[in-house]
Amino acid sequence: MKNKAIFLDRDGVLNHEMNDYICRVEDFKVLEYQIPALKKFYDEGYMLIVITNQGGLALQRYTEEELAEMHKILYATYEAQGAKFTDAYYCKHHPSVSGECECRKPKSGMLLEAIATYDIDPKLSVMIGDKPRDVEAAHGAGVKGILIAPDEVINYDRVKAMLES
């Protein structure tokens, strides 16, 4: 049996959107009000997987160590409330520095890699993001996409209805 996943953009979905790169660990604020809905999905057997563009790495605005520290905070906050992330995929490229790549959303490379790595059925999965490029990346991987406003509460019933449609 294949696995199912809730793919999640990071900035504006799992942590506070700053409308700029989050370059300092102390500026990384987890949106704890997202945990109850995501814990329900986790308890139902969905993998929670982060899919995030982190072009600030290519621009040298922050380091991979600082990014890892932010993800450690994110993971610990969720684990303290009984939900665990399976993985976090990030694109460290930026078009102005790295040119085109297959992983940067709106391309679907990170989703396709996660689907292959964890034997995920795209039809049983959804991507939640706060930018149209998140939904575009989802569709490119055969995953349903849900667009929310930055820092909007994830509506469990809305996501569940989309998964069942």
Image: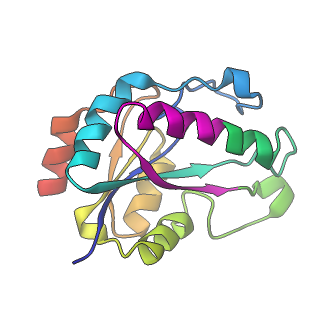
Check the picture and name the quadrant holding the N terminus: bottom left
Is residue 140 rendered to the left or right of residue 60? left
Q: Residue 87 at x, y = what percent?
A: 51, 56
| Quarter of the rendering occupied by the C terminus | bottom left
Residue 61 in view, yes or no: yes
Q: Position of residue 137 (x, y in %)?
A: 47, 60
Q: Position of residue 4 (x, y in %)?
A: 28, 63
Pinpoint residue 123: horizontal percent, then vertical percent.
Answer: 24, 68
The one of 104 and 119 positioned closer to us in this rendering: 119
Does the magenta segment cover residue 79? yes
Examine the image and state in which quarter residue 16 appears.
top right
Name which quarter of the figure residue 107 lies in. bottom right
Q: Nearer the viewer, residue 60 or 102?
A: 60
> How many numbered discs sit on the rendered protein?
0
Residue name at image x 37 percent, y 76 percent: 119
Is 122 rendered above or below residue 76? below
Above or below: residue 102 compared with residue 39: below
Relative to 60, is 114 on the left or the right?
left
Q: From which residue to which does the magenta span run?
A: 70-91
Q: Is residue 86 magenta?
A: yes
Q: Is residue 10 left or right of residue 3?
A: right
Q: Residue at x 29, y 69 (%)?
A: 3
Q: Would residue 165 be seen by someone viewing this image from the given angle?
A: no
User: Which color scheme did the rendering employ for the protein?
Assistant: rainbow
Residue shown at 24% from the left, 32% from the top: 155
- Quarter holding residue 83: top left
Q: Is residue 163 left or right of residue 126?
A: left
Q: Observer-nearest residue: 159 or 139?
A: 159
